[in-house]
Amino acid sequence: MNDLACKDASDTPPKASSPWELYSSRSRRTFLLVLFLVGTLSYIDKGIIAVLLEPIKEEFHASDKMLGLLSGITFAVFYSTLGVPVARWADRGDRRLVITLSLAVWSVMTALCGVASTFWQLAAARIAVGAGEAGALPPAQSLIADYYPPTARSRAIAIFMQSGTAGYSMALVLGGFMAQNYGWRSAFVSAGLAGLVFTPLVNLILKEPRRSAQFAFQRDREESGAGAVRILLSKPAYRNVLGSIVLYYFMSYGVLVFMVPFIMRVHSLSVSQAGALYGTIGTGGSILGALGGGMLADRLVARDLAWLARVASCGFLGAVPLYELAFWSSNITAMLPALFLAITVLSAAVAPMFSALHIVCGSKRRALSVAAALFVANLVGFGLGPVTSGALSDWLGALYGTGEGLRYSLMIMIPMLLPAGWLMLRAGRHLKVDAED
């Protein structure tokens, strides 16, 4: 009897004190790859509209302000609003299930964008895409933070964040190709079908650490959603990072959505040429910058947590003059190297910025901390950024022509990165005090 008891005890897997102890390096890489592909599909469906704006404008006779509305607030309202309750579900439940269901929903709705017969039907379909994508990034980042320890987390998040680069690049290149050769509707349908094909694999491959018998996940039943948000906002580091994320998204979405139209109007390229050019430049710069910034942050964070915020701040501040030079350049040969450097420097800031959130949020609020940040950032940034830059372009275009008006509009938007960099420096002063496992 005693021998049997000893045998049973020895066969019981040891308990893991941290979720990342459950998995081998190979398993982590597999999970990260799947999440990367989910993120790529998310950004394809989110960003493909950028390369389709000109043909949509022609078919529906829309103004730049209406295009900004279509690519911005129509998507952002439900994307932001549903993000918080979905993240609360993810913090208490099965994040793998949340991601799988979200992927299925936004893929179906993206395909339906391709059959819209009016501008407002297309806008309604984009709202539904945003509702589906609310369950993508916060649960995915939450899983990554559980799969990887803090000393390897910035690199993992940097790799995951490159799904945005891959997704937008594929949206620009393939979307431009499809639009030019088969029409803009075929681009939406193809993107949606790709997501539906991948959906079953996500549920099959991903693992939820909370379901493992080796790791006891402690649900906090006493902390309400409102209470969790209050705790997050009580931390100066979180508030400053939140403000920086909002400013970054406002600038980023306000500028990026009009990059292809800018290249087409100012440098006289076709939609496929502009999409391929910006997609290639964006991919190279984003990969180089994100991986470099993530590796640098992981190396320096062992010395001082404040370096997460400092690396992000340097990226924001350094990108401003490079972007202004790129937009001011009168020919495309001069624009390309400046644009590549600008994208590289800015990309180095993103992973450390989100890693700083995970340092201060605590494991039981991981998805909520990201979703709450994205709620505000998307309403202001994704919701108002494209509309603001579009309205500026319309106003300045009436004075200087459509190409120059868009150029000046984008140059006005870029300096929003300056206060974003300042806020990250402020956040760095509080990271150590506000840190929570």
Image: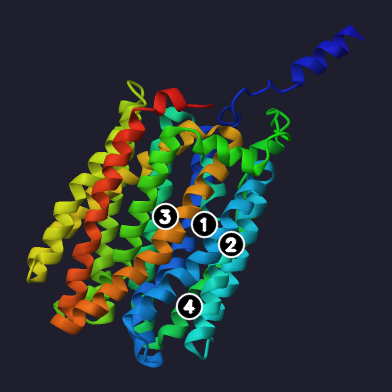
Among numbered discs 4 and 2, the one appearing first in the sequence: 2
143 displayed left or right of 224: left
Q: Note whether 401 is above or below 307 in the view shown.
A: below
Residue tagged by mark 3?
163
Among numbered discs 3 and 1, the one appearing first in the sequence: 1
Marks 2/1: CA–CA distance = 7 Å
249 displayed left or right of 273: right
Circle 2: residue type: Leu
Is label 1 in a helix, a strand or a loop? helix
Marks 2/3: CA–CA distance = 14 Å
Residue tagged by mark 2?
103
Among numbered discs 3 and 4, the one appearing first in the sequence: 3
- x and y percent of residue 262 in the render? 22, 74
Circle 4: residue type: Phe
Q: Which mark is residue 214?
A: none
Marks 4/1: CA–CA distance = 17 Å
Asked if the residue at tag 2 contacts the one at tag 4, i.e. Cβ–Cβ closer than 8 Å, the answer is no
Asked if the residue at tag 1 contacts the one at tag 3, i.e. Cβ–Cβ closer than 8 Å, the answer is yes
408 displayed left or right of 282: left
Q: Nearer the viewer, residue 48 or 68?
A: 68
Residue 228 appearing in the image: yes
Q: Residue at x 70, y 33 (%)?
A: 220
- x and y percent of residue 372 in the render? 52, 48
Q: Residue at x 35, y 63 (%)?
A: 253
- x and y percent of residue 427 in the render? 36, 34
Residue tagged by mark 1?
38
Q: Residues within 10 Å of mark 3 (few under 14, many from 20)?
A: many
Q: Note whether 259 is above or below 395 in the view shown.
A: above
